[in-house]
Amino acid sequence: MTREEKAAVIEDLTAQLADNSAIYLADISGLNATTTSDLRRACFKADVKLAVVKNTLLAKAMEASEREFGELPEVLKGNTSLMFSEVGNVPAKLIKNFRKKSDKPLLKGAFVEETVYIGDENLDALVSIKSKEEMIGDIIGLLQSPAKNVISGLKSGGGKLAGILKTLSEKE
């Protein structure tokens, strides 16, 4: 690979690092061709971009990026696959579901919404991260809850009051 080609790859990786809010580094070494194809197919269905990259080029792209990746460049050893997603927990869920059939991919690290996660032990924490849509749904549910309680209280209170008035009028 010539210097110009390497520079182009680094520039492309830097642009991808800047454009995506969720970046996962995984180790998929040891997967056979069929399993790798299944993983790529699952990534495509989940709208996750999967690419195998050279560690040195990715490290240089991280240096060139305006983001702070913390300790993430230190995990760039061995085979590294890069997973990009717009939703923070989708790659983690994909990895967890895929590991029901296979012991790989292993999570090396992740960069999700300005937070760095190092190591495979953080997979469960990454799975539990809520997406923007889930957070909005939770907030709307919380905001609607008091209003629903007031409305149901008024409806039931109105029914009780009407029942009391009816009973009193029947006694006379």
Image (cartoon, rainbow, N blue to C red):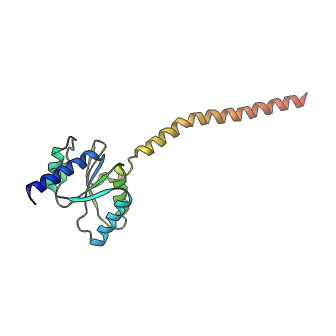
**Residue 90, image x and y in percent?**
37, 53
- Closer to the camera in the image, 30 or 87: 87
Q: How many discs appear?
A: 0
Give me the residue at 34% from left, 67% from top.
Answer: 38
Question: From the viewer's perspective, is 143 left or right of 164?
Answer: left
**Relative to 138, residue 45 above or below:** below
**Residue 165, image x and y in percent?**
82, 29
**Relative to 141, residue 44 above or below:** below
- Closer to the camera in the image, 114 or 170: 114
Question: Where, quadrant-wise, is the N terminus in this rendering?
Answer: bottom left
Q: Which residue lies furthest to the right in this view?
A: 172
Question: From the viewer's perspective, is 13 left or right of 40?
Answer: left
Give me the residue at 31% from left, 43% from top.
Answer: 113
Q: Residue furthest top?
A: 172
**Relative to 124, residue 135 above or below:** above
**Residue 52, image x and y in percent?**
22, 60
Question: From the viewer's perspective, is 42 left or right of 23?
Answer: right
Q: Quadrant of residue 102?
A: bottom left
**Residue 120, image x and y in percent?**
28, 55
Question: Where, quadrant-wise, is the C terminus in this rendering?
Answer: top right
- Closer to the camera in the image, 152 or 64: 64
